[in-house]
Image (cartoon, rainbow, N blue to C red):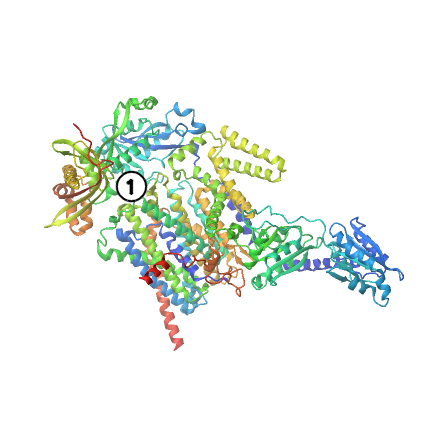
Amino acid sequence: MKWIHRCLIPAACSLLLSGCWSQKELNDLAIISAMGIDLKEGGGYTATLQIINPANVAGGLQGGGAGTNAPPVSIYTAEGDNIVATNRQATQKLPRIRYYAHTNLLVVSEELARKEGIELILDAIERDAEFRMTSVLVIAQGTTAGELVKVLTPVDKIPANKVIKNLRFAEQQRGEHVTMNVQDIIKDLTAEGKEPVIAGFIIEGDPKEGVALENTHQTEPPARIGLGSLGLFREGKLVDWAEGSAARGTVWILDKLKGTNISIDWEDKQDAVVYEVIRQNTKVTAKLKQGKPAINIQVQAEGNIGETRVQLQLDDPKVLLKLEKAFEKEIEAELITAVEQAQKAKSDVFGFGESIHRSYPEEWKKLKAEWHDAQFPELKVDVTVEAFIRRTGLRNNPHKRN
Amino acid sequence: MEKAKISAYQLFVMIVLFELGSAVLVPIASGAKQDAWIAILVGMAGGFLLFGAHYRLYRYYPEITPIQYMQKLLGKFFGKLLAFSYIVLFMYFAARVLRDFGEMLLTFAYVETPLFIVNAMLIMVVVYAVIKGIEVLARTGELFFLLLYLLAVIGFILIVSSGLIELTQLMPVLEEGWGRVLKVVATETISVPFGEAVVFSMILPYLDNKDSGLGAGMFGLFVAGINLSIVMAINISVQGVEILTRSQFPLLTTVQSIQMAEFLERLDVFFMVSVIIGIFFKVSLYFYAAVSGTAILFNIKEPSRLVYPLGLVVLFMSITIASSYSEHIKEGLGLMAKTLQPFFLVLVPVFLLGIAYLKNRKKQA
Amino acid sequence: MPSFFKSKKRKARKRNNQHSQPPEFCQVIHPSLADQLDYIRNKTGSSTDIVIRKASFDEKLGIRTAIVYVEGISDKKTINDFLIESIIKNRELHEKHPKRDPFDILLDEVVALGDVAVHHQWDSIFQSLMAGDTVILIDGFSKALSASTRGGEQRSIEEPGSQVTVRGPRDGFTESIGTNIALIRRRIQNPDLWNEMMKIGTVTKTDVAIVYIKGIAKDEIVDEIRSRLKRIEIDSILESGYIEQLTEEHVLTTFPTYYHTERPDMVAGNLLEGRVAIIVNGTPFVLIAPALFIQFFQSVEDYYGRADIATALRFLRILIFFISIIAPASYIAGTTFHQEMIPTRLLIAIAAQRETVPFPAFVEALIMEVAFEILREAGVRMPRAVGSAISIVGALVIGQAAVQAGIVSPAMVIVVAITAIANFATPSFTVAISARLIRFAFMLAAATFGFYGIILGLVMLTVHLTSLRSFGVPYLAPIAPVIPSNIGDTLVRMPMWAQKKRPKLVASDRNETRVGDNQKPKPDESRGMKRTSEKNGGQT
């Protein structure tokens, strides 16, 4: 038996040495930070790949000098009939292996989202082992995905990171947008009685200026990426944009609001008191009323007073109670605006259908077929809001003004 | 049989690792949709009964393996035939598990690597372990058990703290009644993974304390069942039923969803470690049963001589049993689930127990 | 057929053995003193360190004696004071009692030393002579007297260089077996501390002692060690490493199955756990068997300091061991296979550093690791004065210049440095050195299969470790197999009062308990909330 042992060790070694199938050297990788997808004229897609130039991003010994003279990312575009073909076509120009594992941002143009819908492009991404389901997807609002991906940004050198961080912090502090990754979107698209909402990004200024490195060398860049509205979808297609309070109402109903500011009118003065929400909890429950489905939304919000523009006795709990009532009304109005807009767009982005499905699986079977066209737009929605003012900041009453 | 003794704790550990082995990797009971976790728990109850049957048989013949008592119960010819078919079955199962694993690696990380190479590497480690014998395997199990649970606890904390779990995804419970669940139990979970514990009837005779076998085995199945059920429930609540039923490797999808502090993300390797440990154990135990069974059946004095040729057989079997992953999975759910598994993992043990009971009752009378 | 050859060989060896001892060596001692001295001169080739001092014992009868000793290994002062002087002073003793046997008078009354023996054969005379004893020959007797005068220049007891501790005794073993046994005996003052001496090595005749505590050590293990030592047939034992290599159970492994130490407190501690020590003359390194894997991550200081801190340190050491094995391999796997698992920003930083590196990651890592091994080897062998030059060359050339030239990436230098420090921090040198070797295998596995290779390697390593045994005890005990009563002294170090039992697989089961019941220290009962409130309750 000894001879087998003796043969096995060289065999194992040769196996080891002949390996290296899936090996990719770091120097051979084109790390793609963002991918933009547009519709090509005459069918097919155009993909815009934002590739990181590591030496121009990282500081330290090697990158030091070059960092300021060369752009941190390079753009490659490619065309094809489907997503895989488009991306493979990019290799015609790329001297490296495309590497998607760090593609944290996926941009889809508004045109594509409206005309063809996002369902078809997601399959390749979901199937691919490299591509991450946690990549964030956004819509290029009023522009093409290619343009959006090309714009260079100050502060955050990699534009894809800037977009994601922008979205995440705006979500935390303003609450008019939701960060949606590919997995969330597929979950919503495939769920019965739920549609996704996806944030839109816009370019302020001239997109042509955005591609030059000079864009980042100015205190006020001529081209700037900023958050747009919240896109409402139906059957995978973008149908409407929700803005301002409607957008915030939508986020609120989705129970994804992390913090925001609400202002109310007080004694004939507009936007006189500002309420900073620091915590909220929203519950959506489905009910059957005489065989008809109805939705009940309960909101509990907690927060502080952030600003006052009128004289108020804030050290008086009774005043606070009055204020709370006013905030409750304001929030309720926002939620109702959001529901009305979604109902008009026939897009159940709140997942009301899903809650009915969970609570009344039998009834749902009957409602399912005509949910979007007939049932959802007519759905009765009750909103109850409870707002609590916990603190008023470092001062109680505002200082005297004349 | 080799000269070895294992403790009840070691048996418990091996059962847990074996049951978790490939079951955490591939989608089990996904036919039951969001009730998959219930189907696993019900299957576990069935697994208890089957393990009880193996244990009763072991108590009737505490010194010998099934290979030998099958001959006592069914006569020389039929006994040997049945024993031989079990050996082939063990090897087939080993090959299937190996294939599951190879496919997983090729799909998510080693796309360009040939399946043969990936499988060959693992079977080499398995061969090395099986040559060392059951005691070494059991002790290795004790170590890996700790490691696996450490990983599981860390993974669980990460998943919970990154806020991925939406328990509403598990609703509505039993949407289509018990029918769908029980169908899945009957065709899937009772035999795979719980009925697969038949392999431990080959290992029970090594126990140093005969009475502790039942408790250790049952507890092992219980722990494994609960864990599988929790894993499945987490998978469903993280991904939703729709993605889950389309996932080739649901746990991988769950692990990939973890995003914490911009640093703890893309933890595929985490997943790979736990899967390799589980798969290594499952293949090793099946393979060990096949090797020691062959040695007993054909009276071969030095079982380690068999390890290399049989290892090659398992390796080639794992490559040739299916041409695509879909075919491989369909085979598992079709032919296997409908004929082989119920017959060999459920019916035969019960039948053998019946004969043993009758024979021994006669003897006592 | 092969068996036939084997048996023939064995017979041949037996015959050789008989021939190996020349017949004249066993010869009975010739009664004439002149012949005796001639024989000694012949046998030793008139070596200059053999000193022969002649003296007459009874001048009237002309009984002549000769004192023979080897200079350097015997204590000259003892020989002068208690042998030569005593013989010369007591010349008239025999004259007073002429009827008595002069040999007996010498033995009983003249030689003023403790350890005296009578020899009838040359080989035993030479054995004791070469060990440092003094031989006294008397004309007309075919036997000789030997007195123990072993001594000479020896290294004094110093602090051991290989296992330094902050807290703990400062004495270390020396090259002398007698001193070493005494150091242990001083710590365990108990008649049950037994030692058995044997001579191994056909040429060197080295003293080897088995030391154990009767009743605590397992008899089977002591017997096994004894029989393995008896089986040794070799010309020389120059260090305890010879014994280690000749009596190991597993040859194909890089892991040690003997523990070796220079510290008497460590040996004492291990003897009390039921282990057996093997002391070899001529080396301060004492072997301890059976050795378990976990022992190599423990330090004596763990037992002297607080339990919680010792536990934390032991976890650190296991971490260190893993780092020193897989850190470079993980770097290779991470940068060539699993770029997805590196956080994006870190990946960009590493990628930027690697842009100019002309080698694949594996080659880069290999170059750096080999370069470091060379540096370390140079540092170990160099005279102390040149040592600093090496560190300058190493730091400047490899750390600075290579990075600035863009030949290696700074990240790789960091990895190599961490690996090296981790390796230095491993408490046991033998395990550290085997980790050094295994590391290269892991690098190869990582270069071909990435983390899959590393994990398979770790599985294989674990199977290998669990398959090892040291004198029948599984190497990974008490973790695999789990022995609940011993788990308190593995990765965790429970406080002394909580470690009640000796290691089960090592120590004899007749004497398991170490610590009495209720040894947990408690605060003074008169303090604390509970007591006061009770008192108050009683008063009101």
Residue found at x 17% / y 51%: A360
Q: Residues within 10 Å of mark 1 (few under 14, many from 20)?
A: many
- Chain bearing mark 1: A
- The extreme front residue here reads C539
Q: Which element is circle 1 on?
A: helix
- The extreme right residue here reads C60
Residue C353 rendering spot, x and y as whole percentages: 45, 31
Front-lying residue, A85 or C108: C108
Question: Is the C terminus of chain B in the top left, top right, bottom left or bottom right quadrant?
Answer: bottom left
Residue A3 appears in the figure: yes
Front-lying residue, C7 or B30: B30
Which image quarter: residue C212? bottom right
Residue found at x 82% / y 53%: C53
Q: Look at the picture and state if B135 lies above or below A89.
A: below
Residue at numbered disc 1: A183
- Residue type at the position of mark 1: Gln
Residue B107 rendering spot, x and y as whole percentages: 37, 43
Query: In the visual, does C164 lie left or right of B238?
Result: right
